[in-house]
Image: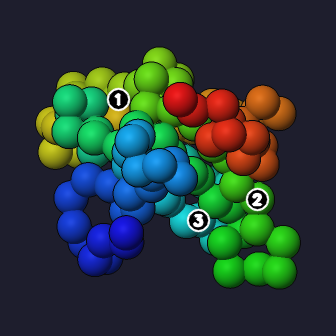
Amino acid sequence: MLTSRNAKGSDLFCSNDNETMFFGVQSKGLTKRDPVGLGANLANLRSDWWIITIKAKTEAPICFIMSLKEVKELCHHSDPAKSRNGAASIWLQPSAYDQPHFREAWHRFETLT
């Protein structure tokens, strides 16, 4: 089931064939290899899985499949004292998500039980 564009939380909800297991997917589409903004609080991230797509508007998009745990472990935290507005922000650097074990790793969904 898809969600509307600016809804909070998952963009897609998936289930297995028996509908005994469900998980949410957050999708981030980028035109180029840029950082992925995650907001100011990791507690607000809800989706079990993340799909980050670069070159999203091309004939050859590249997807990176990450778990929520991996997103949280690999994210970068800004120093609020160094920001223009004094607020913290969190993001994934391209070097964090653009790794061989995440690249086109659709097989990761096959192993969910």
Does residue 89 show up?
Answer: no
- Asked if residue 36 lies left or right of residue 7, the reply is right
User: How far apart are the alpha carbons under marks 3 and 1?
Assistant: 21 Å
Name the amino acid type tagged 3.
Leu
Residue at (70, 55) in percent of width and height:
63
Q: Earlier in the sequence, mark 1 or mark 2?
A: 2
Residue at (84, 72) in percent of width and height:
60
Foreground label between 3 and 1: 3
> In terms of secondary structure, where does tag 1 sit?
loop
Foreground label between 3 and 2: 2
* Front-most of residues 112 and 19: 19
- Return the residue at label 2: 62
> In terms of secondary structure, where does tag 2 sit?
strand
Name the amino acid type tagged 2.
Ile
32 versus 41 height, above or below: below
Q: Position of residue 28 (x, y in %)?
A: 50, 59
**How many residues crowd around disc 3 within 10 Å: few (fewer than 14), some, or many (20 or more)?**
some
**How many residues crowd around disc 1 within 10 Å: few (fewer than 14), some, or many (20 or more)?**
some
Residue at (83, 33) in percent of width and height:
100
User: How far apart are the alpha carbons under marks 1 and 2?
Assistant: 27 Å
Q: Position of residue 25 (x, y in %)?
A: 44, 51
Q: Position of residue 30 (x, y in %)?
A: 58, 65
- Asked if residue 9 lies left or right of residue 55, the reply is left
* Front-most of residues 16 and 107: 16
Q: Quadrant of the N terminus?
A: bottom left
103 versus 5 height, above or below: above
Foreground label between 1 and 2: 2
- Return the residue at label 3: 30
Name the amino acid type tagged 1.
Ser
Asked if the residue at tag 2 contacts the one at tag 3, i.e. Cβ–Cβ closer than 8 Å, the answer is: no
- Return the residue at label 1: 78
